[in-house]
Amino acid sequence: MPLLKEGQFLFNRRYELVGKLGAGGMGVVWLARDHTEETQVALKFLPAVLVQHEAEMKRLKEEVRAGKELRHPGIVATYALELEGSTAAIVMEYVEGKTLAELLEAQARGFFEPQEITGWTRDIADAVDYLHRDAKRIHRDLKPANILVDAAGRARLMDFGISRRVQESVTRHSKGSVVPALAGSEIPAEAGTTKQDSSATLAYASPQQLAGKPAAPADDLYSLGALLYELLTGTPPFFRGNADEVRGQIKHEPVTPLLERRAELVSEGLNASVGEKVPAAVEKVILACLEKEREKRPASAKAVCEALVAGRAAGPPAAASVAPPSNTSPTALGGPSALPQDRRPLRGRSGPLWAVAALVIVCAGAWAILSKPKEIIKEVPQLVEDTAAKQEAAQQRQRADELEKKAKDEEQKRLAAEAAAGRAAAPPAAASVPTTPNTTPAALGGPSALPASTPASATKEAPFTNSLGMKFVPVPIGAGPSKDQRILFSIWETRSKDYAAFVKDSGHDAGEDWKTYSFKDVPGGRGENEKAEDSSHPVANVSPDDAVAFCAWLTKKDRASGQIGPQDEYRLPSDVEWSYAVGIGDQEDANASPKDKVTGVKDVYPWGSTFPPPAGSGNYADTTAKAKGTDLDGSIEGYTDGYATTAPVGSFKANALGLHDLGGNLGEWCADWYDSEQKSRVLRGGSWGYGGPGVLLSSCRIIDGSPGDRGGISGFRCVLVVSGG
């Protein structure tokens, strides 16, 4: 493989290398710009020894082909296998985020509480259920290092054994050499068995995988149980000793109860506290996943998720019965290691940790940096410096402590409210885990019917998630008609897939443009392969009337299912509420008309007080839009966000309240009329097509036609008004 460098064009000059992201024993990963699709991708370059073998490349092509067929919002997409001379690379979706392994490593107390992982559990279960039911695939290697939490907080599966296939192929053609960083990670076949599946990692492998039996969905459920066990305790169920010892434990030994495992780790100085007692119903589900026999495990990933959420909601957790030792100081969290995250000792554990193996090509830590544009990478200080590492560790501990306290407080408030309403009853029947097949098809990309928190208890850290998977956080309103009301804002603009559900269910006459805009009709659009009903891009070409109809439909839907209260209501935000969400509400006159407030707050933008915006601030008219001719009022000189039109929601950093894209992506309809003539609603927030300083001010208002008009820069964001809040 030739030397790679920034600015280099590869594969028929389609991809331009932006920056190196990470390296492992089996290859190197680069951030690249795809000049055909005008987007950023991750290129996983393959070792030269593999490229030279036609049979191995053919085998790998089949793996990639199968991966390309997987289309689900909870799965990191595989796009292609590119080959040019002696250079080959797998083209993957470029995602901002951190792995669950990294997030667990950053937890000061050493583990998560059940209420903190409900959303992730739902996301993982949805994706696994899609794999099993619709794609007829098995992941084979579920573990924290193979699950990425993106910028919007969604958990997404990655690495479907492709990296492991690369490892096996390289090992076969490297004169028997084994890469040291991977030693112990592969599952060797037992004597007398035929090795059918070595693509799992030992600590998360079922007894059947260890025995070399063909993979089955029940093996993924075992791995899911092991993964959840680790998130809730800090270690996999079995991890002590060498590979043979761990194998024997998985096959024959009972699983240690979760609270007992937490206490063990505290006594060893590896965890900071025992924490709350895990609800019995939750523990029952996890232990069911970890049954030695396949037939005794739950019927599906969906059943696991529903039972876990129901078990968590069954009642308040009892106080921990095991007192922590006097020394509860957490181990200091250092900067990234050169080794992949899951090969490092977890929070200072000593001894060989055969339980966790290297993600072959991508270092876990690389994903956090891989997600940043080139400009941001240059601005980030060297994380390996001791001072920076210590500061980061202190901040992580502080954030974890704050989150833990807030989660406990909100959980108690929720339970108290339920008790007052007569709803805090015995554990619901859904907490039991069926072992017979569940024939109800899972909604693709759809969340579980049970929210992670209630509208009354939602916080920035624990948003309310509704029936469509839309997440809502509170925004304090200091003036206007809704002052002192509890107003929850959707953290992102309404997605195409949300709108598709509305159109399909209600029969609303939405036209056709909302399906295709920025998909194929606009230069630099997203192409024709992505379907509107699966898309996480914001829906465009919707009018204020369309948005109002969507909110009315969603209100009726979620009231009927009990997701929201009988008096709770989804609607468009008012102009005043939108100003508070973007951070200028206290600088405007709440009684003035929107027309009278246009650009009234000078030099304040969604990203700060300077222009042009810093790199990565949002999706505005940039150099990408200029190149494709989609900039409507001129592009921002020198600014690049990578999108010629819309970007997936949550692609850019949230503001202090946890809201994404209040500047850029799409303009957002508000409920107010622009002025007393009542001819046009207010549109706030700029868009992907605007780059002028004036139109991007937080106080700018745009007139965009009558209430029935639809435009390509127009979308909307819902708010939820909570009665009695």
Image: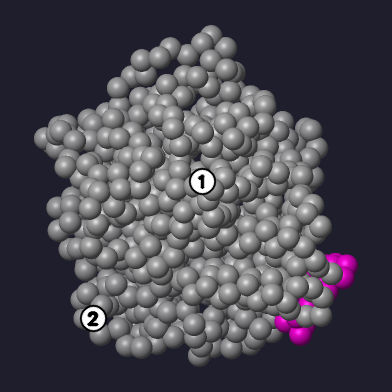
Residue 595: numbered disc? none
Judging by the rendered image, the residue that carries numbered circle 1 is: 210
Residue at the extreme bottom of the image, as rendered? 521
The stretch drawn in magenta includes residue 16: yes
Judging by the rendered image, the residue that carries numbered circle 2 is: 508
Residue at 67 percent of width and 58 percent of height:
168
Q: Quadrant of the C terminus?
A: top left
Residue at 33 percent of width and 73 percent of height:
499
The quadrant where residue 80 appears:
bottom right
The quadrant where residue 194 appears:
bottom right
Residue at 20 percent of width and 45 percent of height:
430
Residue 366 makes an appearance in the image: yes
Pointer 2 with pointer 1, Cβ within 8 A: no
Residue 392 image point, x, y percent: 67, 36
- The residue range painted magenta reads 2-18
Badge 2: few (under 14), some or many (20 or more) residues near its Cα, within 10 Å? Answer: few
Residue 489 image point, x, y percent: 37, 55
Say what secondary structure mark 2 lies in. Answer: loop
Asked if 324 appears above or below 153 in the picture, the reply is above
Image depth: mark 2 or mark 1 in front: 1
Residue 476 makes an appearance in the image: no
Q: Quadrant of the N terminus?
A: bottom right
Asked if 405 appears above or below 531 in the picture, the reply is above
Amino acid carrying label 1: it is Leu
Amino acid carrying label 2: it is His
Residue 273 left/right relative to 357: left
The stretch drawn in magenta includes residue 508: no
Main secondary structure found in the magenta portion: loop
Residue at 49 percent of width and 47 percent of height:
211
Per the model, the C-alpha gap separating discs 2 and 1 is: 53 Å
